[in-house]
Image (cartoon, grey):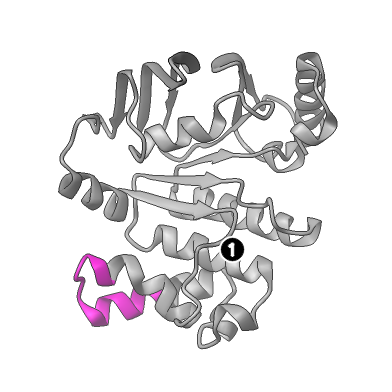
Amino acid sequence: MLTVKNLYKSYKTNNIKYDVLKNVYFKIHKGEFVAVMGPSGSGKTTLLNTISQYIPSDKGEILLNGESIIGLKEDNLAYIRNEKLGFVFQDFMLLDGLTVFENICLPQIIADKNIVSMESSVNKLCDFFCISHIKNKYPAEISGGEKQRTAVARALINNPFLILADEPTGNLDSKSSRTVIEAFINAKNKLSATIFMVTHDSFSASFCDRVLVLRDGEIYKELKKETNRTEFLDLLLKTLKELGGENNDYE
């Protein structure tokens, strides 16, 4: 579903070049839930932004469902971001003046989809994520966990190839975080959603199928959940400890 090959990205400041991503290579298959972790400054957010092409890479390939998305015109990129990619952000990015129902509708409104079909799809997602009881409320009237489940539903409304989630539990308490991760797992298991999540939270990452650990812009290790979640969490914590740094770099 997603292939990233030999990806490089650097920045220049005062004629000094800083390499942020260096020869990054990985694949994500349909229906996988994959996380990327690493210390602050390891390149996690830059990687997400290059995949979505909000920032250009220096060289390398990014293939979405087998098609390159590098070098496309802005109109084509806008279409891909709206219909082939779904986004979930740490700060929810809901529009305060729209209800939960209307926020979920947005990608289909932009795509000029049929209204009857749109309303049916939104109602199904509201039922699926247990937010039907708040669909006529505004973001200011609901909890952080409900906001993020609304954002997940919005990300899925166009049945995208891939959901990109940037620290989706970063602003939530532990109970709400668990609810959001369960929403991702249900989307993966029941809707065949493919999810790529940047996170500092090792607990959330322990629910994923795989975790890519970045260090200094390179993939330090790829960890697969081959046993139970508790043992996978222990493996994640051990690996992150190997990298050193402060605890709040990861959690």
Give the crowd class for mark 1: few <14, some 14-19, many >=20 residues within 10 Å: many
| Res. 22 in view | no
- Could you tell me which secondary element the residue under label 1 belongs to? helix
Q: Which is more toward the observer, 117 or 43?
A: 43
| Residue at left offset 60%, top offset 16% | 216
Under mark 1, the amino acid is Gln
List the single residue furthest toward the front. 14
Direction from residue 198 to residue 241 in the image, left or right: right
Front-most of 147 and 21? 21
Residue 161 magenta-drawn?
no
Q: Where is residue 86 in the image (x, y as percent from the top left)?
A: 40, 52
- Name the residue that disc number 1 marks: 148
Is residue 107 placed above or below 18 in the rendered structure?
below
Give the image location of residue 1, x and y in percent.
35, 34
The residue sitting at 44% across, 54% down in the picture is 191
What segment carries the magenta color? 109-122
The percent coordinates of residue 62 (x first, y second) are 31, 26
- Is 127 situated above or below 148? below
